[in-house]
Image: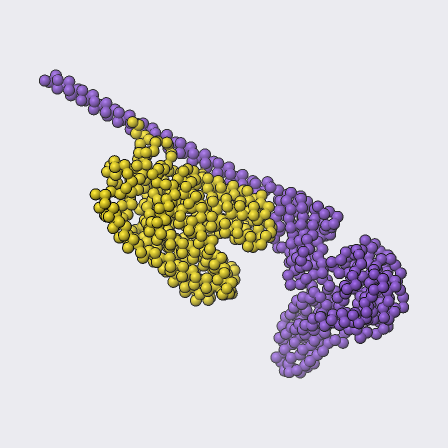
Amino acid sequence: EPAPVPRAGWAPTRPPALTVESGGRRRCVTPAQQPGTGGVSLQRYCSCPARTMRGSGSGAGSLRLLLSLAALWLSDANEPGTAMTTRDINQQTRKSISDYTVKEHDLSTPGSHLTTQDFNQQTEENISNLTSAVYSISINGFSSAPVEENVILYSPANIALSCNLTSPSTDSATVNVTWKKDNETLRSSSVTFNETKHVWSTQYMLKIRDRNQMGNYTCVFKRDQEVKATFHLQVPQIEGKEHHVVSYVGDSVVLVCKSIKYIPISWIWYMSNGSDQVAVNDSLMPDKYTVDEKYANITKLKILKISEEDDRSYWCQAVFKLGESKGKVSLKVLTYMTPLKPFLAIAAEVIILVAIIFLYEMYSKKKQMHAEDEKEFEQIEQLKSEDSNGVENSTTRHRKV
Amino acid sequence: EPTATKEEQQPIPPPDGGWGWMIVLHFFLVNMLVMGMLKTFGIFFVVLQEEVGGSSEQISWIGSIMSSLRFSAGPLVTIACGKLGDQLTSIIGAGLVSSGCLISTQATSISFLCVSMGLLLGLGFACLYQAAAVMTARYFKKRLALSNAIARSGMGLTFILAPFTQLLIDFYGWQGTLLIFGGIMLNLVPSSMLLRPINTKNLQDFSGRNVDSGSLTQSKPPATLTSHLDEISTTETQVNNRLENAAGLESPVPCRQPLLDFSLLKDPFFCIFAWSFLFSQLAYFIPTFHLAARAKTLGIDSMDASYLISVAGIIEAVSQLLSGWIADQNWIKKYHYHKTYLILCGITNLLGPLATSFPLLMVYTVSFAIFCGGYLALLLPVLVDLVGVPRLHSSLGFASFFAGIAAIAGPPIAGWLYDYTQTYAYSFFFAGTCYLIAPISFFFEPSVHKWKLRKEEELNKVST
């Protein structure tokens, strides 16, 4: 499928110096769309996380536009990359273009265009939708251990990281504060430092717009000792399943990944192949893999006709605006013989018990019948002996008489 | 005339031991496996929800059908025992249970499981349970309460089954686990074969007179009502023996008595028992269901909560044994103990909501377990005292049927109470109230006793 590329002929309010000639069409790609399908309707806006519309200097702006257009051209020259890279570039392009208060023009329906007013309104709404948050860490004294905190972001936001150091000593030596990102010292233009009685607080303002700004931000207070606090800016972690999913050969199984609080843009499934990960392509093998994405925050990978080769780990990757994160689900495949063996063992034991009890019952019944026969025999003998005694008595009597 | 067959037919006194202990062993196994399966259904619930799909309401139907059918199929089992005999019914029950487990491994949808797991297992459990209970009552008279309690202590071992089930599911998946469970339940077939039929006579034997008259009507009014019942039972068994021909191990079928005795429903003694059984069964499930949930709302973590439950199980088993032994000493009539335990259960539950911390909750759990075990052990002996052994099958069948209605109604009522009041306190109030209503009927027992004696005298006056 052709990768979306900007097409010549769109008319912004401030016309750029150059146009890009290439095939294909450019549109704001939303996750529900497949690239290459029909045109976007007129009413679809891109919810572009726009920066301030005041314009940030035309010089820097045009340089950025050149660079992004070059990147686009390069991407066109390459093979159509994965959906992800294209989206990234789109994001970049959108941002840089938006600096010029240009309007988004959809070329699929020539002649239709959005008015500048509409677009401005949309972008203004986008600005106010951005969240602002303050994350703060309090450090007690210079001798405390380094403190860490996880900050979970999934969409662009304005945040302020604040470190407060409380030191009990009345030493009025100066305290140096530096902020570092991943061990690189940051320029201090967005840092404020406030020193009141024994509480030194510093604040670092950040506008998070893309994934490059995620990472570890450390505030360092230095006097004679050094103390640090670190903020880990990261995308939400996806929890897979800690325990493996058990399934049987020939059966089908559904692997589920959820992201409850944060809704990702899209999901991608990978399966482990040896030591590396290969994407699961459900469109290539539709009778083996099906991805069900009924809700945006739950993804289900259905694997049909399971065989022993499917016994491996699967990763669901959630794509957020500021990065991706993976969760692991492992599948264990058993054959029917595995539980059948204990079952047959138990069944054999049952049959043996039944046989034993049956034989015991037969044996005790026989014994009972023998005992009764013997009793009967004795009784008959007794009767006989009584009879014979009687006869003898009568004869003796007879004789006696 | 051969004496062999006559000896087999001739009634012997209830052994109160000997082969009776084999019957107790079988009943113990039945209790352990049946209750174990019912209690571990909760674990299957979670797994089934993930793998087969379906809403939690649909899946809980399986559990409801299973536990309610175990009671409600009582009358059906009575008929089966009447026609086929206890031993065969029990074997059929074991077969139903294991085939239900095996068929369920092939299940593809929830409705399939409702039938294969809910229906078949419920029916099988009912067959097994009732046949075993009645056989125990036949084999034991003086030590019925103790032997019943020993058999019921099998329920206390079910707490082992839960982690075992979880282990099996982790290893083999739910289908493999059901396959293995089917095999384990198959063990009930040889243990059912231990149910050797016996026809018992009771100690007071008024043979001769009544048999010659050839009718089942009561003749002379004896001193106490219980001995009167014994006389009827003796009469019936002896008449049956005469009417029946020798057939090896066939158990005697009371020919003159219908298989399912609907006249029991009018018998005030049965009504007394059914009333108390219904309310106690309604109340029984609620504290057990909601104990873990209440512990959670009080902030107690799940490890401690499961510790509570296992402690409750063990204490209940021990208390059953003690209660059975005490009742068998015959210091006072058994139903007095039963009454007392029920009242104490009710009071404990009414005070339940006061337990707001882990030690207090432990106190509540321990006392509830003691009194609960006490009254549970006496259910069968009290029923035997009230209606006698020959009509035990019918009465147990009907009583179980009513209990089945309570078993279906109980948990939903409790759930509705929680949803309505958003606190578990009212469930405990409800349970406590039910437990206090249950023994009310026993207070009428002396007056019913006198009423029946008067009726006997009137009948005798008429006949003489």
User: Horizontal and vertical percent for residue B262?
Assistant: 37, 46
In the figure, the shade used to draw chain B is yellow
User: Horizontal and vertical percent for residue B379?
Assistant: 37, 51
- Relative depth, front residue between A363 and B211: B211
Q: Is A322 placed left or right of B74 in the picture? A: right
| Quarter residue A327 falls in | bottom right
User: Horizontal and vertical percent for residue A49?
Assistant: 75, 68
Residue at the image point whose x is 72% and y is 72% from the top: A128
Which corner quadrant holds the C terminus of chain A?
top left
Viewer can see residue B202: no
Q: Is B394 placed left or right of B100 in the picture? A: left
Residue found at the far front of this picture? B462
Residue at the image point whose x is 70% and y is 79% from the top: A193
In the figure, the shade used to draw chain A is purple
Residue at the image point whose x is 52% and y is 52% from the top: B61
| Quarter residue A233 falls in | bottom right
Q: Is A248 placed left or right of B42 in the picture? A: right
Viewer can see residue A305: yes
- Relative depth, front residue between A285 and B194: A285
Residue found at the far left of this picture? A401
User: Horizontal and vertical percent for residue A283?
Assistant: 74, 49
Looking at the image, residue A91 lies above or below residue A271: below
What number of labels is visible? Answer: 0
- Relative depth, front residue between B84 and A133: B84
Residue at the image point whose x is 56% and y is 40% from the top: A341
- Relative depth, front residue between B196 and A15: A15
| Quarter residue A240 falls in | bottom right
Looking at the image, residue B203 lies above or below residue B244: below
Which colour scheme appears in the figure? by chain
